[in-house]
């Protein structure tokens, strides 16, 4: 299913912080306007209480909730839900535009593993992505938790999953010139932390993956291991350092980049569904 | 006796006491440690695999720092008919419990416990559907 590139353009080239969300109880798509109003009131009330999010400037926060019907894997998935917070300074004129201040979206791409086991009245949107101040994220999160009895958890990405991602994305075919494939490692147990950045020419990385992958469209753990072992061996030959003993903390390719703290940036719209499917899977395994 | 890899240096062979148990330590955050253990296994005499070898996987408390699939380690245990223990060294409770377990295993392997030998571990490793 291809999402309309114009509608999803705002998702690209932004750093999204990832969370896993348990199913929402009694969420009704028809009541989005009402939810937006309630969330806006909640944020205003919290600000009154003194939990100010912006110091100095008086800001009215406007909330908009919308559905992104195209952003899903199959008909079994719920359509994505977008939450946008924008501000209009009280000092400026009435015609001034709203400035987007924070956005977050819930989605599920091929998340049937979760949704098939869940009773009625529950809406499954296990992946939550946010962009903007952490204070707004916790306000929005608290409101959703109170209203729909769900639970948010930061989604960390293990080195094992990061290596899966870099192998998958390095092998993607791209029309224009791709940026380098980069792996960042952090070396533990040193008196001063050391980061090693390993950049590989994208064509070399893709050529390596093509020799490793046996069945197009299918990836196995063995293939990912062979790919990574080749990269480690090459590095060891030149620098006598065993990268396999270090911790892989970030991977970057022309398709997307991911950091172990659960931060992702998607750069290519054609691979958006694939990336979201992988992230949905990670979110679901964190929930279960 | 602690070693970072096998084989042990041959110069000290004559000074070394009998080895009763070999514990291979695998750090779940380091792929390198798994590779190191896999290469070291080749230097172990076959007689040790009758209950005198065990694998100890550490760092299992940090799920988000996994660089190794647990399946891969369990498969290693199956291939070499040796038990796989999981432990988190940073937590005092499990560290002590694991140490006590290893000492008990060592006692059996060294023949200090009457009526039980290292071979008992091998029979415990066999799955019920083998019988």
Image (spheres, coloured by chain):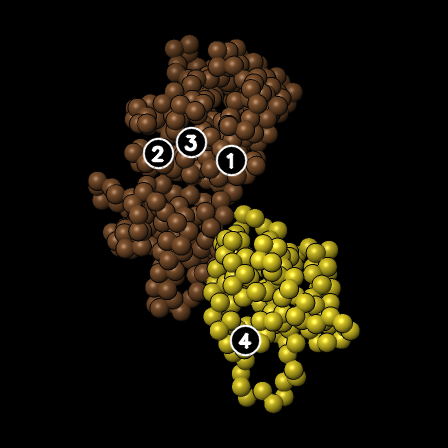
Corner quadrant of residue B121: bottom right
Q: Nearer the viewer, mark 2 or mark 1?
A: 1
Tag 2 and tag 1 share a subunit: yes
Residue receiving disc 1: A284
Q: Chain of mark 1?
A: A
Mark 4 or 1: the one toward you: 4
In the figure, what tint was chain B given? yellow
Q: Give the crowd class for mark 2: few <14, some 14-19, many >=20 residues within 10 Å.
A: many
Q: Is residue A286 above or below residue A203?
A: above
Residue with the most extreme front position: B131
Look at mark 3 in the image and give the residue it sits on.
A110
The 10 Å Cα crowd at callout 3, few under 14, some 14 to 19, many 20 or more, is many
Residue B46 marker: 4
Could you tell me which secondary element the residue under label 3 belongs to?
loop
Q: Which element type, helix, strand or loop, lies under badge 4?
A: helix
Q: Nearer the viewer, mark 4 or mark 2?
A: 4
On the image, numbered disc 2 is attached to which residue?
A272
Residue under the point 62% across and 51% down: B61
Between the C-alphas of marks 4 and 1, the distance is 43 Å
Does residue A41 sit above or below A184 in this rendering? above
| Residue occupying image coordinates x 70% and y 76% | B110
């Amino acid at each position: 299913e291809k999402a309309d590139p114009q509608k999803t353009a705002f998702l690209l080239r932004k750093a999204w912080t990832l969370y896993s969300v348990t199913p929402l109880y009694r969420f009704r798509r028809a009541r989005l306007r009402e939810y937006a109003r309630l969330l806006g009131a909640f944020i205003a009330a919290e600000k009154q209480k003194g939990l100010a999010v912006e110091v100095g400037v008086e800001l009215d926060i406007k909330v908009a909730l919308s559905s992104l019907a195209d952003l899903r894997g199959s008909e079994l998935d719920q359509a994505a839900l977008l939450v946008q917070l924008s501000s209009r300074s009280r000092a400026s004129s009435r015609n001034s535009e709203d400035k987007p201040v924070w956005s977050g979206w819930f989605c599920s791409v091929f998340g049937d593993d979760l949704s098939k086991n869940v009773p009625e009245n529950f809406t499954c949107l296990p992946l939550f992505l946010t962009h903007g101040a952490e204070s707004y994220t916790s306000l929005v999160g608290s409101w959703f938790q109170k209203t729909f009895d769900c639970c948010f958890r930061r989604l960390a990405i293990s080195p094992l999953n990061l290596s899966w991602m870099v192998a998958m994305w390095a092998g993607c075919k791209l029309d224009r010139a791709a940026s380098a494939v980069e792996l960042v490692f952090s070396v533990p147990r040193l008196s001063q932390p050391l980061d090693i950045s390993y950049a590989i020419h994208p064509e070399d990385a893709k050529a390596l993956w093509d020799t490793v992958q046996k069945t197009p469209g299918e990836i196995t753990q063995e293939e990912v291991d062979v790919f990574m072992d080749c990269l480690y061996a090459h590095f060891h030959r030149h620098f006598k350092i065993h990268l396999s003993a270090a911790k892989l903390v970030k991977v970057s390719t022309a398709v997307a980049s991911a950091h172990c703290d659960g931060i992702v940036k998607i750069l290519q719209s054609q691979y958006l569904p694939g990336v979201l499917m992988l992230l949905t899977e990670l979110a679901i395994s964190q929930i279960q | 006796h602690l070693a970072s890899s096998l084989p042990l240096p041959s110069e000290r062979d004559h000074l070394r006491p009998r080895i009763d148990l070999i514990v291979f330590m695998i750090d779940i955050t380091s792929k390198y440690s798994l590779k190191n253990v896999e290469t070291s296994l080749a230097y172990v005499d076959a007689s040790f695999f009758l209950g005198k070898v065990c694998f100890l996987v550490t760092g299992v408390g940090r799920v988000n720092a996994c660089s190794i699939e647990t399946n891969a380690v369990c498969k290693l245990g199956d291939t070499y008919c040796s038990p796989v223990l999981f432990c988190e060294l940073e937590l005092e409770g499990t560290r002590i419990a694991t140490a006590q377990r290893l000492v008990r295993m060592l006692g059996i392997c060294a023949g200090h416990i009457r009526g039980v030998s290292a071979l008992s571990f091998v029979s415990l490793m066999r799955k019920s559907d083998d019988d």
